[in-house]
Image: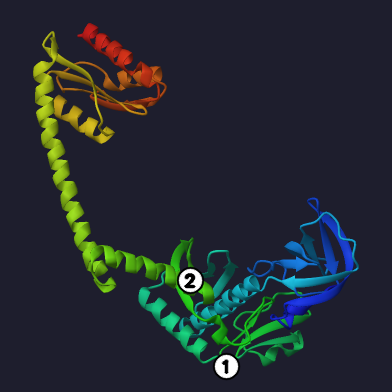
Amino acid sequence: MTIKSYLTNSYKKIFESRVIGQETVEGRVAIALEETCFYPPSGGQPADKGTINDKPVIDVYEKDGAIYHVLEAEKFDEDCARGRIDWERRFDHIQQHSGQHLLSAVLFKRHNIQTLSFHLGADYSAIDLSLKKMTTDMIEKVESECQRIILENRPMRVHIVNRDELHRFSLRKPPPEGLKEIRIIEIQDYDFSPCGGTHAKGTTEIGLIKIIGLEKIRKNIRVKFLCGNRANQDYAAKHRVLVDLSDRMTCSWQELPAIQEKVRAERKNFRRRIAELHKELARYEAKTMIDQAEEINGVRVISQILPNREMNELALLCKEIVSNPSVIALLAVVSDRVSLVFGRSENAPGQMGKLMKEACQKLGGRGGGRPGMAQGVGTRIDLAQAELRRIHQKVAKEL
């Protein structure tokens, strides 16, 4: 059985302890200690990192009441272990986990919303709430209440009690079943919650709580948030972006939303005008191609590989061509692949969908469509010209 120093003192960074056991994990030695400051993963909080006798601790786990420390080493021959916690990582976890307690407490006290689960990730932390929707106004009020409690620097205390003493505490959630002793984290005059994680001495150490995103998870809401140094770094990064955008747009950051809306509207107008110009160009190209096309038994057949255009432009041109009577269009564009569009007028014969499947099979791709219009792509660009010529000859033979 390992004495867990972190349960009573989250701020202890250096310790010594006797080795009480060893085992091998994927070729590395894992040592169990009589006492440890290293926190194993539990309750949504990841494990601590650090060193033991100058060997990196890469993982921590609990087994049969003992805490094992996986070292970046194949063996460990010493009886005494001198451990050092990675304090930057530990304090980050203290800020995130303590911030989660405060955030969950505010949501419960002010809005009667229960936290269903907690996850402390490398980039952000998250809680799942029994809630269908969270408004911007609600987020701002929750953040404001959290900041008020943080600035009051309310003490955060640890209570380790047996079940007979639980009636003394107004717990936000029930403790896990089967535990003889319950560890309770208190935010003075605000919250009592069962927890085994590492926590701050007072709310000021949380620094700041910022909600950065929401995600719908089945019937619940996942709230992504940052605390302390993470929130400060996030603010600094976003501030740099705002300053850069303001400089580029020669405006203040407050004017950016209005300018963005203006740019969005202008882009929409440009896209509409470009689409109109594409259509005008397609009409002109269609007329020119029809005038120059070979006529076979009263049907003009256009077979052409065109340069540099997207599939939607190719389809637009084909539609313009076959909007005229007695025309068949077999069009292609060759780039890093072969793009094909086949079409015919309503009064022209032929099964374009069937022809397209045949051509795409030859060109190592796939495609299909209706009798009057079909699209497809292929990978054999070296065969594109020959295959289009073959399809042209087949159409001509059937007319």
Relative horizontal placement of residue 366, taking residue 184 as reference (left or right): left
Q: Quadrant of the C terminus?
A: top left
Left or right of residue 4, residue 150 in this image: left
Give the left or right position of residue 248, taking residue 348 as reference. right
> Is disc 1 surrounded by few (<14), some (14 to 19) or many (20+) residues within 10 Å?
few
**Does any portion of residue 323 appear in the rendered image?**
no
Residue located 30% across and 23% down the image: 353
CA distance for labels 1 and 2: 30 Å
- Count of marks overlaid on the render: 2
Task: State the SS at label 1.
Answer: loop
Quick one: 77 or 179, which is closer to the camera?
Answer: 77
**Which residue shows up at 53% across the image and 78% down it?**
104
Residue 2 visible: yes
User: Which residue corresponds to mark 2?
Assistant: 233
- Left or right of 284: which side holds 69? right
Quarter of the image for residue 307 reads: top left
What is the quadrant of residue 388 in the picture?
A: top left
Image mark for residue 9: none
Q: Tell me: residue 359, above or below residue 94.
A: above
Extreme top residue here? 397
Residue 203 image offset from top left, x and y in percent = 56, 86
Q: Which residue is mark 1?
A: 189
Is residue 296 placed above or below 33 in the rendered structure? above
> Residue 89, percent across and down?
63, 70
**Residue 82 percent location from the top left of the image:** 82, 72
| Type of amino acid under label 2 | Gln
The location of residue 46, given as percent across then percent down, is 65, 66
